[in-house]
Image (cartoon, rainbow, N blue to C red):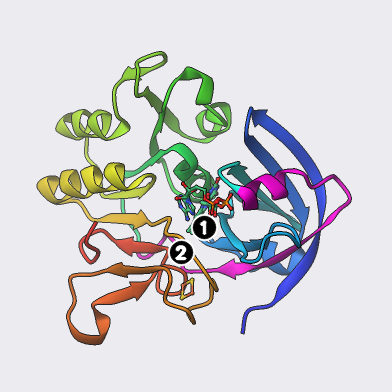
């Protein structure tokens, strides 16, 4: 049974309107977390269910996560002040890394870029593609650029590549070797990346951001469809994932 901890909010900033960067003191989580795992957060006593948010980074006794305000839960969370305790369960789920591959590519879009930061730090010589709606929504680009060769795409061409990050990846793969693709982002983006990886015959890991209930495998709210049959037809994103091989899930 996973434990929940009362974690003191140590640092808080609003990176751009509606996107908050939190660091909490959480030694029990920071020392056991691996890249790709997530936290299940009780946003306030006004919001019934916990909300899943990825671990963006860990250092020492601290855990960093970044979230966008979407609805009631994340809005309540954004009201927390430095010094407040936050009830956090975790780390939950599995990891991005399974096996060793050369020339890894990391690709993410929107809130999907946050779990990729800790992964990028762990990889050897990764190339990173990040997609945003427009220039005003770009966050932590400088932090990615400091640890990896990083390319930015915006949907409206206001910064970097004009179009989707997946299209940029497709062009990159025409001229560069890639041993594995790691990805997280909105469903249409993951679908496109899955197709690209299949065409190029490159293994691909996808992290799914499904709606969740319990977060620990008990309620089945987070089920996703797989290529398997029988009892394995549906997998739980919270417990069997959130990271899957793209070849095993139906997107
Ligand atoms: C494993 C995992 C990791 C995640 N990591 C992050 C992260 O690092 N940063 C971050 O900002 N968000 C992350 N999310 C998404 C985050 O959990 C949702 O945005 C949040 O639960 C919305 O809660 P709410 O109460 O604010 O909004 P709600 O009122 O519950 O919903 C508001 C809107 O958000 C949509 N939404 C709700 N849940 C999700 C979801 N799970 N994924 C996508 N859209 C959703 C709804 O369809 C609705 O349109 C993650 C989700 C999962 C499953
Ligand atoms: S959220 Fe309950 S089983 Fe996954």
How far apart marks 1 and 2 lie (CA) works out to 5 Å
Residue 35's mark?
Answer: 1
Residue 51 place in picture, x, y as percent: 59, 59
Q: Nearer the viewer, residue 153 or 202?
A: 153
Which image quadrant for residue 175? Answer: top left
Looking at the image, residue 127 lies above or below residue 39: above
Question: Left or right: where does residue 117 sit relative to residue 86?
Answer: left
Q: Secondary structure at mark 1?
A: loop
Looking at the rendering, the stretch of residues picked out in magenta corresponds to 72-99
Looking at the image, residue 205 lies above or below residue 173: below
Mark 2 = which residue? Answer: 95
Q: Nearer the viewer, residue 53 or 101?
A: 53
Residue 177 place in picture, x, y as percent: 22, 39
> In the image, what residue occupies the spot 26% across and 49% down?
179
Precedes in sequence: disc 1 or disc 2: 1
Question: Left or right: where does residue 3 sit relative to residue 98?
Answer: right
Q: CB of residue at label 1: within 8 Å of ligand 1?
A: no
Q: Residue furthest top?
A: 158
> In the image, what residue occupies the spot 66% across and 53% down?
58
């Amino acid at each position: 049974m996973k434990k929940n901890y009362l974690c003191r909010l140590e640092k808080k900033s609003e990176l751009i309107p509606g996107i908050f960067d939190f660091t909490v003191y959480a030694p029990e989580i920071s020392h056991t977390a691996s890249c790709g795992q997530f936290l299940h957060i009780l946003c306030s006593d006004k919001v019934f269910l916990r909300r899943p948010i990825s671990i963006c980074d860990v250092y020492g006794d601290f855990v960093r996560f970044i979230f966008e305000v979407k609805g009631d839960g994340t809005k309540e969370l954004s009201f927390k002040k430095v010094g407040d305790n936050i009830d956090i369960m975790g780390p939950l789920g599995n990891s991005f890394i399974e096996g060793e591959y050369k020339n890894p590519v990391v690709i993410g879009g929107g809130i999907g870029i946050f779990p990729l930061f800790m992964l990028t730090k762990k990889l050897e010589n990764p190339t990173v593609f990040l997609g945003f709606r427009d220039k005003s929504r770009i966050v932590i680009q400088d932090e990615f650029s400091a640890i990896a060769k990083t390319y930015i795409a915006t949907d409206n061409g206001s910064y970097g590549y004009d179009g989707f990050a997946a299209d940029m990846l497709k062009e990159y793969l025409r001229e560069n070797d890639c041993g594995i693709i790691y990805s997280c982002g909105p469903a249409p983006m993951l679908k496109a990346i899955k197709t690209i990886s299949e065409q190029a015959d490159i293994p691909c890991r996808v992290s799914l951001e499904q709606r969740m209930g319990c977060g620990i495998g008990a309620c089945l709210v987070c089920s996703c469809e797989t290529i398997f049959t029988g009892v394995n037809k549906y997998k739980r994103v919270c417990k069997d994932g959130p990271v899957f091989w793209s070849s095993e899930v139906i997107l």
